[in-house]
Amino acid sequence: LARRARCCVVSVDYRLAPEHPYPGALEDATAVLNWLVSNATQLGIDPHRVAVAGSSAGAALAACLAHAATDGALPPLLFQLLHQPVLDDRPTASRREFRATPAFDGEAADLMWRHYLAGREPSASAAPARRENLAGLPPALITCAEIDPFRDEAVEY
């Protein structure tokens, strides 16, 4: 994707739950975005043309960064690419439909959220679909699979 788009890509090696529950991964992603924009000149990139992207849980982090950028807490973002995102901790029809499938399933999704939230009350800063107002967010490309337990939350978002 980077080669085709002719852009610089920075990959975030964020901390993972259950050893590092929320907000660990989001703090790591936030620190990298701030570092990237602060060092844009030295890196040879345009700080006004920054996008975020992620797959699965990484897409949730990208969406959370876009929310914070829209709220003025982070530098502005131009675009967000959310590939098969995990956006909502609440039950959906697709999560029930794909409760036990050969790939990632609804049971694993529930376990993932329990590890990530580690007993904390879900919030929009942890689960992007809980944000009530999506107005003003940067344009997004959201992909999902028909047989994905996260399909319905991606479509709804």
Image: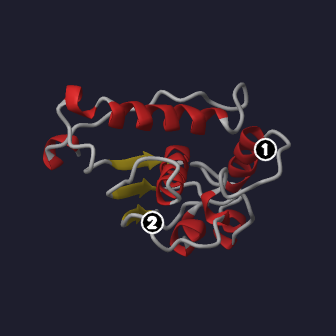
- The answer to whether the residue labelled 1 contacts the one labelled 2, judged by CB atoms less than 8 Å apart, is no
Q: Which mark is residue 137?
A: 2
Q: Nearer the viewer, residue 110 or 68?
A: 68
Count of labels in the image:
2
Q: Position of residue 105 (x, y in %)?
A: 65, 53
SS category of the residue bearing label 2: loop
Residue at the outermost right position = 119
Q: Where is residue 73 in the image (x, y as percent from the top left)?
A: 53, 49
Query: CA–CA distance between discs 1 and 2?
Result: 27 Å
Q: Which of 150 and 21 is in front in this view?
A: 21
- Residue 103 in the figure: left or right of residue 5: right
Q: Which mark is residue 134?
A: none
Q: Who comes first in sequence, dot 1 or dot 2?
A: 1
Q: Residue at x 65, y 52 (%)?
A: 125
- Residue 57 in the figure: left or right of residue 88: left
Which residue has dot 1 on it? 114
Q: Residue at x 73, y 47 (%)?
A: 113
Snapshot quadrant of residue 22: top right
| Residue type pointed to by label 2 | Leu
Q: Position of residue 100 (x, y in %)?
A: 69, 55
Question: How dense is the environment of label 2, judged by Cα within 10 Å: few (below 14), some, or many (20 and up)?
Answer: some
| Residue type pointed to by label 1 | Arg
Q: Where is residue 81 in the image (x, y as percent from the top left)?
A: 38, 56
Q: Nearer the viewer, residue 39 or 15?
A: 39
Q: Which of 1 and 66 is in front in this view?
A: 66
Q: Quadrant of the C terminus?
A: bottom right
